[in-house]
Image (spheres, helix red, strand yellow):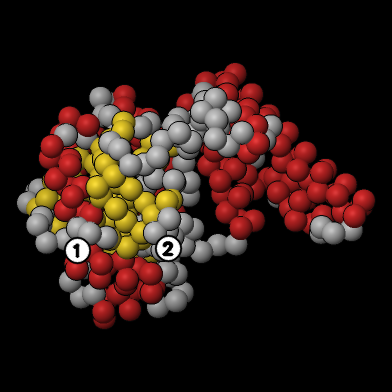
């Protein structure tokens, strides 16, 4: 990383998100006027002409063409090597900056420097609340609740659905365990100390791992409702839902093995196996009894188990 000379380096990983990425970049320049910044886009070998379009329509940004799909963690690590900001903002391409959100987030960080990691509020295109801006830590209990569907049936319960902070309305300042990596501000020196994301993660769970390690260094991730962005959700990784679920299962098992210890990791992975198996059996039974659901969708994750387990 170069000498720190500007307020923030904004890192964007692009993968077949040409139009969204351009819209995101334009919103950054339109809405960020009070702080110095640079935008670094790393393109993960897109096939939709993303790099060419960004270079033509947004000539003020730095573009890195990876030549392969590095995934989210490794791509951000590569982009950060040329960053020179005092802070680093991880930003998804399926976001739009609203109401000087980055300026407000940097001001908030300046007012709360000891926290060392900061995030904002997310909304969908229609202005409705997007709750995926933060999470509590994975625990063996949260894995059990998810795998037994308790978190689904009691979605508003802090006890049975602890990870998405169901009682937090996102309209107040709050310390959280994990800030979602699509809009995460971090001190550059902390990023360097942590050596960025763990490159073993490809997609999903990398920010959970980053925040856990950052908190071990004394960071306290903090959210402000005043910094507001549009986050469409899912647009930054345009892959079919089955592949996304496989990537998520793989990432969660990686995380559990790294952070839960041998016995906890084994228990968590057994719970995940149990859930996938039960979903396949229930889907098949439903098809046999009613004929209304294709069993192939239910069996897909079980059939592709070698890819995620």
Q: Disc 2 on helix, strand or loop?
A: loop
- Name the image quarter holding residue 210: top left
Q: Is residue 71 visible?
A: yes
Disc 2 residue crowd, few under 14, some 14–19, many 20+, Cα 10 Å: few
Distance between the alpha carbons at the discs numbered 1 and 2: 19 Å
Disc 1 residue crowd, few under 14, some 14–19, many 20+, Cα 10 Å: some
Per the rendering, the mark at residue 86 is none
Task: Name the residue: 38% across, 69% down.
Answer: 20
Give the residue at the far bottom of this rendering: 56
Q: Is residue 279 above or below residue 142?
A: below
**How far across and how far down the image is residue 24, in percent?**
31, 66
Q: Is residue 41 above or below residue 178?
A: below
Per the rendering, the mark at residue 31 is 1
Q: Is residue 221 left or right of residue 73?
A: left
Q: Is residue 177 left or right of residue 85?
A: right
Q: Which residue is mark 2?
A: 126
Q: Disc 1 on helix, strand or loop?
A: helix
Give the residue at the far left of this rendering: 5
Q: Is residue 65 visible?
A: no
Task: Name the residue: 42% across, 69% down.
Answer: 17
Q: Is residue 248 left or right of residue 270?
A: left
First reached walking from the N terminus: tag 1 or tag 2: 1
Q: Is residue 4 above or below residue 44?
A: above
| Numbered circles on residues, count | 2
**How far across and how far down the image is residue 294, in percent?**
81, 59
Given residues 124 and 236, the one toward you in this image is 124
Task: Name the residue: 62% across, 44% down.
Answer: 308
Marks 1/2 in contact by CB < 8 Å: the verdict is no
Q: Is residue 288 above or below residue 119?
A: below
Q: Of discs 1 and 2, which sits in the foreground?
A: 2
**How far across and how far down the image is residue 193, in percent?**
24, 34
Task: Name the residue: 69% across, 32% down.
Answer: 148
């Amino acid at each position: 990383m170069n000498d720190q000379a500007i307020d923030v380096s904004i890192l964007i990983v692009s993968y077949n998100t040409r139009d969204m990425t351009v819209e995101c970049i334009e919103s950054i320049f339109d809405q960020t006027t009070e702080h110095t910044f640079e935008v670094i886009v790393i393109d993960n070998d897109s096939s939709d002409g993303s790099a060419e379009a960004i270079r033509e329509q947004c000539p003020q940004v730095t573009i890195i063409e990876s030549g392969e799909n590095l995934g989210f963690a490794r791509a951000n690590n590569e982009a950060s090597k040329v960053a020179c900001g005092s802070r680093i903002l991880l930003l998804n391409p399926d976001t739009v900056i609203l109401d000087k959100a980055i300026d407000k987030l940097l001001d908030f960080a300046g007012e709360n420097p000891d926290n060392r990691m900061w995030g904002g509020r997310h909304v969908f295109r229609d202005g409705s609340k997007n709750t995926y801006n933060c999470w509590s830590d994975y625990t063996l209990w949260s894995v059990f609740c998810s795998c037994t569907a308790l978190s689904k049936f009691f979605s508003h319960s802090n006890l049975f659905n602890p990870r998405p902070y169901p009682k937090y309305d996102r309209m107040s300042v709050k310390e959280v365990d994990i800030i979602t990596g699509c809009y995460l501000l971090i001190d550059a020196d902390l990023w360097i100390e942590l050596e960025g994301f763990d490159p073993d993660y490809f997609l999903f769970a990398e920010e959970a791992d980053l925040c856990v390690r950052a908190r071990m260094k004394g960071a306290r991730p903090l959210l402000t409702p005043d910094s507001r962005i549009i986050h469409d959700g899912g647009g930054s990784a345009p892959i079919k839902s089955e592949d996304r679920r496989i990537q998520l299962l793989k990432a969660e098992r990686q995380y559990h093995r790294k952070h839960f210890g041998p016995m906890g990791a084994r228990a968590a992975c057994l719970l995940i196996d149990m859930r996938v198996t039960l979903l396949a059996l229930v889907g098949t039974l439903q098809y046999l009894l009613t004929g209304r659901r294709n069993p192939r969708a239910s069996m897909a994750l079980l059939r592709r188990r070698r890819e995620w387990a």
